[in-house]
Amino acid sequence: MAICTGCSLLCQDIEADVSDGRLSKAKNLCRKGHGHFQASFSERTFPMIGGKQVDLNQAIARAAEILRSAKSPLLFGWSNSTLEAQRVGISLAEKLGATIDDTSTFCQDSLMESILSGNLPSSTLDDVRNYADTSIFWGADPSNSHPRHLSRFSYYPRGEKRQKSYEEERTCLVVDVRMSATAALCKENLYRVSPGGDAEFIEAIISVLEGKIPRVGDKKKMIELGTLLKKTEWGAIFPGPGLVYSLQGNMEILERLLARLNEITVFKVVPMVGHFNTRGFYELLREKTGHVNRVSFKGGEIAHGPEQSVMAAAKSCDAALIVGSDPLSSLPFGTAQALARLPLIAIDPHRSLTTDAAEVVIPSAISGLEAGGTAVRTDGVKIEFEPIIEAGIPADEQILKRIMEAI
Amino acid sequence: MVSAMEIYMLLPKTNCKKCGLPTCMAFAVGLLGREKKIEECTPLIEEKKYEAKLNKLREVMAPLESASETGLIIHPEKCFGCGNCVVACPVNVAADPTHCGVGLGPQSDKVILKIEDGVVVANNLEECKRFGPGRVLCNACTATCPSKAIEFV
């Protein structure tokens, strides 16, 4: 049995034969996970300085030199690294007085802040499987982002108190701006909102729960939704980036909805983060600094705010260490352009636009396949895993430790 | 997927009964259920004026030839590998309740649907509720598929 680090569900029932340099007889891997496993055999990186292949020791020495001489370095990425590597990364940021930020700075951070601070009630996905009779996917399309979400936890499996599962006991609702693949599975329970209309929709639900006529949406359908929510015994809301973007950091309104729902029945919020250990980084950094991302240790003091985000830091810093991420492809053009002008150090198992543009490239082992460690699933459950391939490539954690020693 | 009415439109529509069925519509349903073969409609094969219709009929019926005994057709190129069908299939759950039943990948060899190399594959089709004369028109696997990768004839 292996573990899949293709998304934040960290499926543990994977069987795969990876002997003789190729993937065969893979069982239970979804298409996304299969692609993730297969990618370990192509487009791998080599230690490089300025586009020329070098020895690993030379690459690490050069990386340490760049970071040591930088006045305000940026450490970015982290969502695709194990907890052990993230811990070393945070210590490195502290030692360098650097700015540290993660890949989801554009995404789920405000929601995670609310969940980790306890303002939004949360639970594990195993509880969802055992008890939930209503699952609401809000601005999320797990069929594409977390393909096994519905079959492992939220809709189709039988649970302790839900033996009849989707056939009789579970209802799945989707709130989205479009007919997504997940919405196609529960067409009668799709609530379409206009882009940016989620806050209004939440207000409408709150009015319906209080017995008032809602001001937006199809009134009859909204009243039906209110009745369904009131009848729910144990509900779970899965907010995706669609909801978080739409609320623009205004989590107070979602907190108000959850507080109202929890006066009537039990409702939990389970986040749907993207990369396999995004939540791990949030928890570690929050434990250390009180903030989930966008932190600067400059001058030995902890600073947090939009100025410490990758967008601002890319323009103000003088070197950047990128771990397991490809910001030059994924971030907005202005930020990517600013990053590309810096001396970049990329620690990545795969070749990407960022590794192509980087001054120093350090190859690392793929977590879950070639390196073991611990990761935090999207619902907060810690999962340990062992490597299934002996590749002889150092893990992120070992590389970062060596950089730290060299500094 | 082709419908019985579309097949009927490509038949002679003379109700000649040469195929042994009372009407061409009944023959169309028989073709769709794979109880009849195109060759049993002798006028369609023998008479020159039906040649265009025959060719069109062979064209629309071609995808059905890849269907299994239960009429199951899997389009692997559309499959997400999400496993919804694996967990929803009542035969899978009965064969492996401790895994399929609770959302995990099957460990038993008796299951019908499982995910291999990122896409769904079907085995043991004789266990499917749609198999044989006493079949039930179960649609647990098609109804739970987000990408329409599974179809029944």
Image (cartoon, helix red, strand yellow):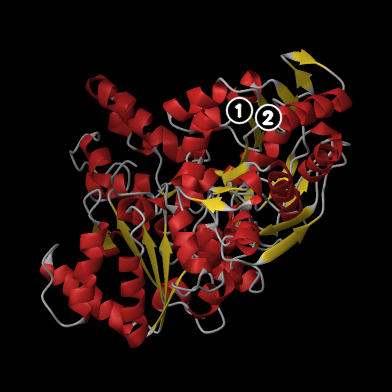
Residue at 72% from the left image edge and 33% from the top image edge: A349
Q: Chain of mark 2?
A: A
Disc 2, SS: loop
Residue identified by numbered label 2: A70
List x then y, in percent, for residue B86: 56, 60
In the picture, the disc for residue B125 is: none
Based on the displayed image, in which of its 4 quarters is residue A45 positioned? top right
In the picture, the disc for residue A318 is: 1
The one of A222 and B60 positioned closer to us in this rendering: A222
Residue B86 falls left or right of residue A388: left
Whether residues under marks 2 and 1 lie with C-beta atoms below 8 angstroms apart, the answer is: yes
Quadrant (top left/top right/bottom left/bottom right) for the N terminus of chain B: top left
List x then y, in percent, for residue B81: 55, 49
The one of A354 and A401 positioned closer to us in this rendering: A401
Q: Amino acid at mark 1?
A: Asp
Q: Earlier in the sequence, mark 2 or mark 1?
A: 2
Is residue B107 in view? no
Disc 1, SS: loop
Q: Chain of mark 1?
A: A
Residue A189 falls left or right of residue A25: left
List x then y, in percent, for residue A209: 22, 80
